[in-house]
Amino acid sequence: MPSEFPTKAVLIHFSGPDAPGLTAALTGVLAQNNVNILDIGQAVVHEHLALGFLLDVPAGSSLTSLKSALQDLARKLGLQSHFRVIPKDAIKHWGFGLRANHFIITLLGRSITAEQLAQVSAIISAHQMNIDRIDRLSRQLTPDTDAANACVELAVSGDPSREVAMRAEFLATAQRLSIDIAFQRESIFRRNRRLFAFDMDSTLIQGEVIDELAKLAGVGDQVVRITEAAMRGELGFDESFTRRVALLKGISAERVHGLIDTIPLADGAERLVQTLRLLGYKTAILSGGFTFFARSLQQRLGIDTVHANELEIVDGKVTGRVIPPVINGPRKALLLAEIARSEGISLEQVVAVGDGANDIPMLSLAGMGIAYRAKPLVRQSADQSISNLGLDGLLYLLGVRDRDLQAHEPRME
């Protein structure tokens, strides 16, 4: 802003059919009339332009001649124009608003409806926050296939003391409307993350390797009951893991490795990791599962680092033990910190993704912790919760638009 406040502030708004060169023509007139641009905003929706300028018209400059020149040009360009002188107290309020806290609210689902937008914007309004910008990040908001993604990003500003209450309301609203609502502070780190760390079972893949091994051993029901109790946080991970692995004793190594091609990747996992690699991110698997499966994923997806449990096999048979140390929740967080440190990456630049109670320590440590299709305890503990899209929906939380990736993705025949 100029020193203190402008002599005369004028808001000018242009709207009409979009075409190349409109902004250049209009700013050319401004340049000829000795005015300062305090603020500018432009949006195009379905080839219709909305362009606004907030101008400081210094003493001695003619607002009448400026207005006349812009109106004449707007008519030639097929645009409507509106002029409004802004009172000094409103300019002061605007100036103070520039120093407000800024947040990003992201709506994610298979479609985004008017009802969903209405309820989210009502929450924003109830907490006296202002919507500064709205962007569509997906190709469409009402996709033509069930597998497509829909995403809208809202930039808002307001009182940071409202954050906790808004998060709670967004979580409840998301569950009621069957969408995901992410709420994060705008910062220099949001578009500058550098490391993604993933849990494996029920996160990168659609299932639990230990449950599938248990079926092979004929103890599936017993292991599933222990697994569910552990994932709900009702049973300590180390105890539950030791009990489950002991039940696997006697399975042949051949049958163990035969699982590698039987458990599918999570929806969107391949697209997410390929995109992260394209953008230069480091990736890691930090898993309470087993190395034989994690290393196969590492080769398939191009993951940089893997830490998982080594299932002990002697004379071609599972012994019912793992080789220490066990990768539990605290160790996942420790490994995450070690990887970040070795790569020279701030923890604020780390994204951790998981679904179980043993993922909470690393989700809490990372700059962004994401509960992916997670249990209630984990959803309540994480910064963000995604349940309605595939893993590639996480790209929207970084501000990545579908159109940004079109040139880098395989063309559909």
Image (cartoon, rainbow, N blue to C red):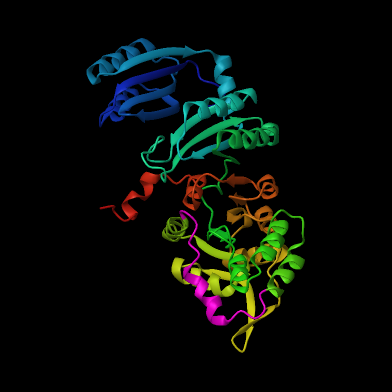
Above/below status of 363 relative to 222: above
| Count of numbered marks | 0
Residue 52 shown in magenta: no
* Residue at (45, 66) in percent of width and height: 301
The spot of residue 309 in percent (x, y) is 64, 73
**Does residue 329 show up?**
yes
**Does residue 102 show up?**
no
Residue farthest toward the bottom in the current orientation of the protein:
315
Relative depth, front residue between 222 and 120? 222
* Residue at (25, 15) in percent of width and height: 75
- Magenta-drawn segment: 248-268
* Residue at (41, 43) in percent of width and height: 146
Q: Is residue 392 left or right of residue 408?
A: right
Q: Is residue 200 left or right of residue 238?
A: left
- Quadrant of the rendered image containing residue 144: top left
Relative depth, front residue between 268 and 218? 218
Above/below status of 114 relative to 289: above
The spot of residue 123 in percent (x, y) is 61, 27
Relative depth, front residue between 186 and 196? 196
The spot of residue 288 in percent (x, y) is 65, 66
The spot of residue 24 in percent (x, y) is 29, 30
Q: Is residue 82 left or right of residue 388?
A: left
Above/below status of 274 relative to 135: below
Residue 252 shown in magenta: yes
Residue farthest toward the top in the current orientation of the protein:
64
